[in-house]
Amino acid sequence: MPSDPAPEDAPAIQLIDLHKHFGELEVLKGVSVEARKGDVVAIIGGSGSGKSTLLRCTNFLETPSAGRVVVDGEEVRVRADGSPADRRQIERIRSRLGMVFQSFNLWTHRTLLENVTEVPVHVLGVSRDKASEQALVLLDRVGLRDKADTYPAYLSGGQQQRAAIARALAVEPSVMLFDEPTSALDPELVGEVLRVIRDLADEGRTMLLVTHEMKFAREVASEVIYLYEGRIEEKGPPDQLFSDPRSERLKQFLQSIH
Amino acid sequence: MSGLRAMMRPHRLFLMALFAGFVIWCALSLRWDWVPKYAPLALEGLWVTILLLISTSVLGFLLAVPLGLAQAVGPWYLSAPARAFCTIIRGTPLLLQIWLLYYGLGSLFPQFPWIRSSELWPYLRQAWPYAVLALTLSYAGYEGEVMRGAFSGVNKGQLEAGRAFGMPRFTIFRRIWLPQAIRNVLPTLGGETILQLKATPLVATITVMEIYAVSSRVRAETFIVYEPLLLLALAYLLIAGLITLLFRRWENRGSANPELPRTRREKNLPLEG
């Protein structure tokens, strides 16, 4: 697979001056984010702040209106209207970004094992045997090996989300994208999913993590970004940002959720 | 087996006895001496019916997929003709469509010398290609409408997950969209296929010798009316039963709907449970 050789110290992902508007509504007004290998960047903000849109612009599920996206030193080539210019390139880049959705989005007509092997076998060209073997290891990791032959509908939300994380891991992603991974879960199921994400952070995975779990963000993030109305209002290391926020709005935000 | 005990309830036994009595009465007091003579023809007719059913359902479904897709997500220049096609097919009697194709096209073709001299001409002079065409278009029209709903009904998040992992568009279609769409409408498709079976006797009107045409011929030649019709009903019942069984198996296989199949759910229980 041809890919530009990335310099050793190139950031795993760079979002440069992203803008996004839906018609009149401007959701992102120039946001830049950079994550080096092993960084965990937590993106927080109120509803409508643009944090999910920012994440979805990263792999072009939403087409940014302006701005650049660079993954492993390779910039996504775009047309004048902002849409990806090269289908092959964007598909290749997407397959390196393991995404975990708020509503899991496991493929309901496939077992957990098939969910995890789907992309390796049908996109990355891994042999079925090898993919299955690897999938069982990953399912084991998230504590679902005994559910490998089960369909997602038979599982709890927490189990589904852990399986979705295994699916994302199966592509050996350079960056993992988490879009509010615990927001759709019953409170008692949040912990099991956060534990898995924490393990991944601890082993040095690069992540962009949109979340409402402030305590968790504080514990795992290497950097926290607070978005307000489509702009970065404040960013910094979690301890400083949470204990000593400079921005008035961030102070209010942190108070409002405690 | 609780199933066997349930069968042995008094009212069930009574019904079974009644049915057995009917069968015995049929066998003893009706005329069956014509059967040996017409059996080979009847088997051939049965085969034609089954062949018509399978070929037109399969071909019709292959047409229904693009028809449904065009209506669900196509640009107007694809969705408008697809919608028009489905409306016309569903809005006119199948008998009329069969006759229009057979008598209309059938009398149009001979006027073109290049058609008459083509390789296809020996087939175009027969009735069955028009029967296959008419039944295929009919199935496609109805199922095109079913598939439109089926494609629209697939959760967008399912497709988005495919996109997010870099699946090419055709892979998303083949691996996620189409299987989920079909799975959602399998019960409907099963019912529609039974309707298709019961539409096949109409092609007897354009001289295709399927099973109904055979029973008509028996009646015309022997003046025996009810016996061939009873056997005919039995034949259709058996085929309809087979269709039902077949679709039920497809539904149970690869279903992910907890409400649906019990067997599947039991399989999914953890081994130690």
Image: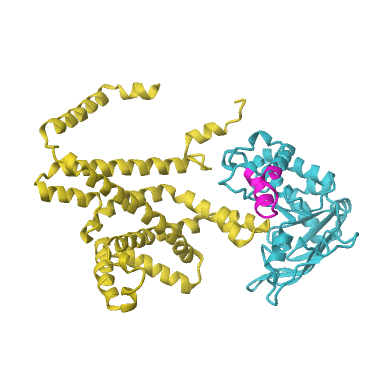
Chain colours: A cyan, B yellow
Q: Is residue B108 depicted above or below B136 in this figure?
A: below
Residue A205 lies left or right of residue A85; in this view the side is right
Q: Position of residue B182 (x, y in %)?
A: 48, 52
Pick the residue in front: B136 or A255.
B136
Q: Quadrant of residue A6?
A: bottom right
Q: Position of residue A198 (x, y in %)?
A: 79, 43
Residue A253 seen: yes
Q: Position of residue B81 (x, y in %)?
A: 41, 71
Q: Is residue B35 depicted above or below B5 in this figure?
A: below
Tell me the chief SS of the magenta region: helix
Residue B86 lies left or right of residue A23; in this view the side is left
- Picture residue at 51% right of the left edge, 65% below the top: B73
Is A224 a magenta residue? no
Residue B128 lies left or right of residue B32; in this view the side is right
Is A122 a magenta residue? yes
Pick the residue in front: A94 or A28.
A94
Q: Which residue lies most toward the right here?
A: A9
**Magenta region:** A114-131
The quarter of the rendered structure image containing the N terminus of chain B is top left
Pick the residue in front: A140 or B54.
B54
The quarter of the rendered structure image containing the C terminus of chain B is top right
Q: Position of residue A124 (x, y in %)?
A: 70, 54
Residue B3 lies left or right of residue B102; in this view the side is right
Q: Which residue lies most toward the left here?
A: B223
Pick the residue in front: A236 or A195.
A195
